[in-house]
Structures are given as C-alpha cells and as structure tokens.
Amino acid sequence: MAHRPRLLRHLTSPFLSPRFFFSTAAAACLSNKTQIYLSRSRDPLLNLSVEHHLLQTVPTDATVLMLYANAPCVVFGRNQNPWIETNLARLLASSQRPPIRLVRRRSGGGTVFHDEGNVNFSVICPSAAFDRNKHAEMVVRALRRLGRPTARVNERHDIVVDGDGDGGGTFKVSGSAYKLTRLRSLHHGTCLLQSPNLDSISGLLRSPAEGFIKARGVDSVRSPVRNLHLDVAAFEDAVVREFEEMYGRPDVRDTVEDAAAALAVPQIRQGYAEMSSRGWLYGQTPRFVFSTHPTEQDPRPRPKLPFEERIHFEAKQGVIERFHIENSKGAQKDVSSLVGATLYDIDDWSARLADAGLASQPAQQIGEWLNGILGTEFTKL
C-alpha cells in the first residue's frame, strides 16, 4: 500500500472515528476560533445546507474550513437564470443515473459543474478579515506543494495553471463564489482534480435558449478548463495543512458523515427543504425577456426558427407577466390566458398553447420547439 503523508493519516483517522461528528454546539462555542470540517456526504443540498448553517452559527471571530465533493450536479448562482446557464434537456439525457441534479446556491457567482473528482473548499471568516484572494492563495500554495508550480490566482480571483506541451495556454482549475454578511463572510470554490466528466461540461453549461433570452441576472464567464490530475485525499491534506499554517491547530475537527444526523438539526433541515423546492430552484430567477426576434432592447441576431410566428414573453420569479405571439403578417394571437402561469409548472407547451386558443398545427409546432429549448421534460420533474 502506498504511504500516505503524515498529516493526511492524522486527519483521516479522527474524521472517521465515531467520536468525531458534526456538532452545532461545538460549531457555536465561543472558544472554538478555528474549525475544520470534512463532509463524506455527496449530496450537494446537504453540503450547501451544512455550509450555510456554519455561516450563520460559528462565532463571529472564528475561521472555518469545510471540504466536500458532490455527486454530479450543475450548481448556479443565487441571481442566475437556469434557462440560460445550462442545457436542461442534456441534463436529463445524460447517461448519469439518477439524472444530473440542478442546484441554486445561496451565494453569487457563476455556474459550475460538480462531481466526485471536483473538490469544494469553503472558508468562513470574520467580514472584517475578508479578502477575495486570501484563501484562493491558500489553495494555490497547496497545489504548488503537490507539484503544480504554475498555479496562481488571476485578476478574476480564479485559480489557473499553464498548459503542458506545445499548445500552452492558460486553463482554469478553480472558480469561486462569495456570500458576505455583516459579521461573517463565506468564500467557497471548486478545484478540478480528476473529473471524469470534463469533456461533457461545456455542453452541459451551454443552453440552447441563451440566444433568445435577455436577463437581469449574472452571466457566467466561460473559460477553458482542465484537470489537475491530483489525488483527492492528497489535495484535502495539503489544503488542511496550509489552513493550519495560517490559523494554527483547530479547536474543532469534525466530519459530516451521517446525513440523518445532520438533517436532525432544525436549521439544516429547513435549509435543505428550501433548496429542494422548485420555488427556490426556478422561482428565484430574476426578470428576463424571451424573444424569438431582435428587439430594440435586445438587437442580437436570432437563430433560425422552424416556424414563421414570433414569440415574446417576459417572466419574473418564474411567473409569466406578458406573452405575445404574432404571425408573419404581424397579427397578434390572443394568448392572454398564459399571463400569470408559472413557467416551470408548464409540462407541455403544445397543450398549453392549444388551451390558450392557438390553432392546432402552430400550437404543436411551436410547443414542441419550446419544450426542447426550455427543457420542459427536466423542469417538470
């Protein structure tokens, strides 16, 4: 058996011991200024709910590290639009079983893909000490310790590395998001170590509806990515070591291993239920406009359509506020009954357009197109 680094052996044993488990009382104790948590759960909603609970619970002068990896999922920012950020139909069609999960987190930032080869690091610290680069640089030092000397933080606060071979180039291996409160701040980020899904990420995060939607939310910035080809345990060990060098040995070193025990904490259970709801996932979407043709507000050229009609609708928090269809001669169809409908509760656009009074053939043609481009088979799950 290959020899593991000393600190990893020290770290792993207490985490797996029954004597060490997640404790709200320990997290909240005023004397526990430095805390480390390792989650063995692969449930993204549980990990994000525990993380949020820590943000709300730990002493205001504490500094906390949490490390976790999730089952395959697409995680998008608090103020983003899921119909823009991901190809919902492709999530459903993926060979992953169960289907890749879609998650709206509580922090800002862009959309990322998670899987078990993509480790998440999270640092909670006093807001007065918050700095967007401070803990990204901590991870960079860990990566250099592991033999990645070109790792660095760029001007967007992402961690990047230089490519190998003749192709060269710079590749993103870690992106970050933040949540700042009056007393505590959260910085969490990903790190691509050995994701088996790297070739699929671009397609999953490219929506067919993007060319038709103008939104008020935050757009993701796409960058070329690559794996670091590092062992997950070795990475966790190196990050913990750098954290301890910054803050000293922890007062708390706990694990999140038993989902039922974590969900027995009322605040975690409440957060989990909220993030599981369709109202959170889709209903928190900022106002956006969907238009199949250029407008004064959005003059971009549009992709070619399989029909002649023009469609324009506006939605806020997933509720349709305006909906117009006009034919090639400019005559509008009365589909006013769609106003007030919840976008993510429409399970078949063809049937809904027919019910709204559109003739059978255009209702079928337009409806099938909307079902595909808006990922209706996924949103109705």
Image: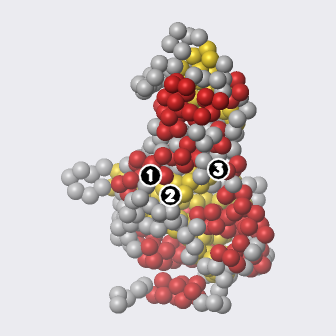
Number of marks: 3
Q: Which mark is residue 269?
A: none
Q: Is residue 157 above or below residue 257?
A: above
Task: Please name whichever residue, 360 or 115, is drawn nearer the observer in this view of the structure.
Answer: 360
> Which quarter of the picture shows residue 125?
bottom right
Residue 381 seen in the current view: yes
* Residue 363 x, y percent position in the rendering: 55, 27
Residue sticking out furthest to the front: 360
Residue in the picture at 61% in, 59% down: 187
Name the secondary structure under disc 3: helix
Q: CA distance from mark 1 to mark 2?
A: 9 Å
Which comes before the other along the chain, label 1 or label 3?
1
**Mark 3 packing: few (<14 Cα in 10 Å), some, or many (20+)?**
many
The residue identified by callout 3 is 281
Residue type highlighted by circle 3: Leu
* Residue 40 x, y percent position in the rendering: 56, 76
The residue identified by callout 1 is 93
